[in-house]
Amino acid sequence: MRTILHSDLNNFYASVECMMNPELKKYPVAVCGRVEERHGIVLAKNYAAKAFGVKTGETIFQAKCKCPDLVTVDPHYNEYMKYSRLVRAIYCDYSDQVEAYGMDENWLDVTGSRMVFGDGEKIANEIRERVKFELGLTVSVGVSFNKIFAKLGSDMKKPDAVTVISRDNFKEKVWGLPADDMLGVGRSAIRELHRYGVNTIGDLAHCPDEMLSYKFGINGLRMKQFANGEDNSAVVHRDFEFPIKSIGRGTTFTSDLTCNSEVWCMILTLADEVASRLRAAKKKAHGVSLTVKCNDLAWKEWQCGTEHPTQNAYELACRAFELFTKNYPWVKPIRAMTVRAIRLDDEDICEQLTIFRDAGRIAKVEAKDRAVDEIRRRFGRSAITSASTMKLEKFPGGAEFELTMPTGLLTLA
Amino acid sequence: MAQKVYVKVNADFSPEGEVRPRSIIWRDGSVFEITAVMMQIRAASTKVGGCGLRYTVRVEGQERYLFRDEDRWFVEGK
Ligand SMILES: [Mg+2]
């Protein structure tokens, strides 16, 4: 039988801030998006803030209503990346199968290390103690015989704790928990399950196959297998790199956009950076998605395909702008926008040409993009740019890039 | 509360890549010789925050912690 650990850094962003500045530990603390760029929302909080009911995702104003003495701090993404890396280095002392799930969670397969370091629980406790001593952070660790239960375990007791879910005790420990605590049971699935009176993981484990496959197809049967502890998925090797699923660039404008021409300039600017990233990653996109947030904080997302796989800014921007003009009713000014290249493929993959496509023109566009990249490499990003994006007063500096991995979201500063 | 004080350090870098701090130069320029390095271990500073490679060093007959966090050195000041 395998021994799998899932280790989760507790309140990661807030814990790093408190570790670097121990004075903060006395107070309720929230790490918040920067106010001047108007991302005034709570990204993470410590336990003291949690006790006041402060929640991730709410605005600083809402949080301060609940907790007037809340101390807010700016995020330091480079530090989070650094500690994420250092914690992984500790894990790698115990196994070469270490799989990240977002920045603060990892699975470890320690099956082969038990002869050296002792059983899963012993390894988990050693990791927990080392992370606390060496890095001043706390983890909660789940120990089990598969990834799904290991993850469940790491949620059951925190902070700074170890939970063991074994073949012998999983029915008592796990089956009473709400079904959507389990990885693989999404928000839409749980709504459907509730309608059939399936509330706990135990209920799911006993659900008739016919009903599950009728309602959810293959995923329904998988959920049931997970609930019964039948998850055979492997923990990947620490050097394995997941293929990037999408590359996006978004920003919150310094003041709201109010007309199509402004929107076009912003879309072109965002698409330009996405396209550069695509070319650097040697990827082409088969689709584009556009996310728009109005000034009442409601947001919408649309997607469409591209005519052919592309890594060209203008083409991505045209598709994104089409999505916008087709779908946005202009009832409200726009506060934030993200352009994403989706359905990525390697750039050198063979593609089917059609007689309607001007392959010569595409080759010219690609040559031009390469020339632009080269000029920017030598003289900086602003050395060459589209005339329409030259002076953008509402575009803030220093916004964030995102790369979406299949297992989670990694934000690069 | 104790304060994190970044300091200038003289150190020897061995061909094997080992680093041995030799002296600490305080902000006012005074030099404190490190007469012995007792231990080195990765550790967090619970007193002043941050973490790194922690050297237990003897300075003027007293044991002190000296931290190396990437390329910066700090001590737990008063
Ligand atoms: Mg966490």
Image: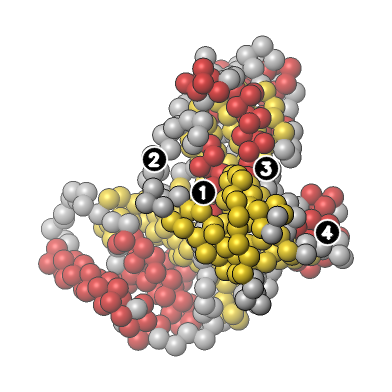
Secondary structure under badge 1? helix
3 or 1: tag closer to the N-terminus:
1
Check the image and report above or below for B29 versus B44: below
The residue tagged 3 is A132
Using a 10 Å C-alpha cutoff, classify the residue at mark 4 as few (fewer than 14 neighbours), some (14 to 19) or many (20 or more): some
Q: Position of residue A63 (x, y in %)?
A: 80, 62
Q: Chain of mark 4?
A: A
Depth check, front residue: A161 or A207: A161
Secondary structure under badge 2? loop
Compared across the picture, whether A195 is left or right of B12 comes to right
Q: Which mark is residue A235?
A: none
Q: Which mark is residue A239?
A: 2
Using a 10 Å C-alpha cutoff, classify the residue at mark 1 as few (fewer than 14 neighbours), some (14 to 19) or many (20 or more): some
1 or 4: tag closer to the N-terminus:
4
Q: Which mark is residue A27?
A: 4
2 or 3: tag closer to the N-terminus:
3
